[in-house]
Image (tube, helix red, strand yellow):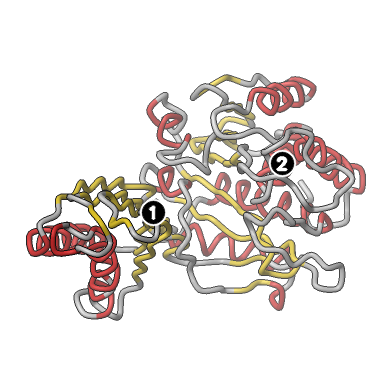
Amino acid sequence: MNLTGTNEDDELNQYVITLRREFHKRAELSFKEFETSKMISEELRKMELTPVSIAGTGIYCDIQGKPGARTVALRADIDALPLQEMSGDQFSSLNSGAMHACGHDAHIAMLLGVARKLSMDPSFPGRVRLMFQPAEETPPGGALQMIREGVMDGVDFVLGQHVISTLPAGTVGINFDYGAAISDEFFITISGPGGHGSRPHETSDVVYVASLFIVSAQALISRMTDQTQPSVLTFGTIRAGDRFNIIASKSEISGTVRTYSRDIRDRIRDGLQNTLTSLCNLYGAQFSFNYEEGYPALLNDRRVATVLNDVAIKLAGKEHVLYPPPSMGGEDFSRFLEIAPGAFFRLGVGNVEKGITAPQHSPRYRIDESALMLGVNVMAEAALELLKHGVEG
C-alpha cells in the first residue's frame, strides 16, 4: 500500500474536507453528539464496515486485514464546545451555542479518511480499530466509559492526533514522553456571618479570607513543590457580595491544578485544604472544598512515538517535524494510554498568511484544511508500521 504523499489522492482529500465541513456545521456538545454519531455510522456502512455504538454516542469499528497477531486502535474525539461561532466560515455551525472550536470535526473526518484508505486495501496483517469518542471536552470524558465497555480489549497499540493552530500547516509535532498534563478542578465555598460594611469586627469577612487564600495558595507552587517539575495553579472564578456596603456571607472560588506528577497533584490538593483550614480558623469562617480529579497526564510510549516520528519524517520531511514542549492542557486520550502503549501527536493547521491564527477554544477558530491529508497519512502509515513490525525494544 502506497501512502507516501500528502497530495497523492485528490479524491480522498476532497472527501475529508467535505466531511469536515459537514461535521462542523452540525456541531454537538458532549454526550449529545447524536447527529454526528449517525453521520459517522452512515459513512462507515458505505465502506461496508460495521459500526458499533458504545458509551452512548460513541462509535467503534474494526477493519480486519489478513491474519495477524496485532490490533492497533486509532481514536478521534467528536464533541464540540459551548461557544457561539464567530469564524465567518460559510459552513459555520448551524447549532446555536455549539462550535467545533477545538478541531474535533477535523479529527472525525481524518479518521474516516483513514477508514476509507485502509478498507479499500485490507492487505495489512492484523486489525485496525477505529474509535470515535464522545465527550472529550467534559470530564470525566467519554474515554473512560468506552474503556469500561471494552473498546480497548485486545488492543496492542493506540494512536491519536490533535490539530493545533499554533503549529503551521504541513508540520507534525511529536512528544516522546509527556504530551499533556493532569487536569483537575476544584470548587470552594467560604462562608460566615456577614454584616454592615462599617462594622467588619462583627463579621467573618469572607471576601478578605478568600483574598488571603488566593494569594497564600500561590506559595504551594513557588515554595512547596519541586521547581524542576512543571505545575500550575490557576483560580478561574471568584464570586461574592451584592452591594458596596455589605460584607458578604459567602464567597465562591473555582480553579484548576495542572502537573504531570500525581505526587505533586496530591501535595497541592492537600495544601489547598490546609491553607483553607488555617485561614478559616483564624477568621471564624467555614468552608467546603470539592476537589475533582480530571484526566491523568498523557504519557506517550517512547517506542511508539519513535514510530510516529519516523513516519512523519518520511511523509512531511525532517524540517517539518517539530518537537514542541509538552502542553499543560488536559486530554483524555491519556486514559487509553493507561491501557495500551501508544502515542499522541499534534498536526499543525495554522497559517499566518491566510489569517488562520485564532487559538483553540476561540469563537474565531479556523483551520488550514490543506493539512488534513497529512494527518490521514501519518495515522494510516503509523498504524501499518505497528501492525507489521511492532516496536523496537
C-alpha separation, residue under disc 2 versus residue under disc 1 = 47 Å
- The mark lying in front, picked from 2 and 1, is 1
Instruction: Look at the image and tell me whether residue 167 can be seen.
Output: yes
| Mark 2 vs 1, N-terminal side | 2
Taking 295 as reference, is 360 left or right? right
Q: For residue 239, which numbered disc appears in the image?
A: 1
Badge 2 marks a residue whose secondary structure is helix
Q: For residue 259, which numbered disc appears in the image?
A: none
Identify the residue at horizontal 25%, vertical 64% (top origin). 198
Instruction: Look at the image and tell me whether residue 170 can be seen.
Output: no
Q: Residue furthest left?
A: 281
- 306 or 264, which lies in front? 264
- 207 or 357, which lies in front? 207
Query: How far across and down, in percent of the image, does residue 282 sit?
Result: 8, 64
Q: Residue furthest right?
A: 10
- Which quadrant holds residue 68? top right
Query: How far across and down, in percent of the image, does residue 110 sit?
Result: 72, 44
> Looking at numbered disc 2 in the image, what kind of residue is underneath it?
Val
- 309 or 163, which lies in front? 163
Disc 2, disc 1: CB below 8 Å? no
Q: For residue 114, which numbered disc appears in the image?
A: 2
Identify the residue at horizontal 29%, vertical 67% (top origin). 211
Query: How far across and down, in percent of the image, does residue 205 sit?
Result: 22, 60
> Looking at numbered disc 1 in the image, what kind of residue is underneath it?
Arg
Identify the residue at horizontal 77%, vertical 57% (top origin). 367
- 202 or 130, which lies in front? 202
Q: Is 33 above or below relative to 5?
A: above
Q: Is 139 above or below relative to 183?
A: above
Identify the residue at horizontal 48%, vertical 45% (top origin). 157
Q: Is 283 above or below relative to 3?
A: below
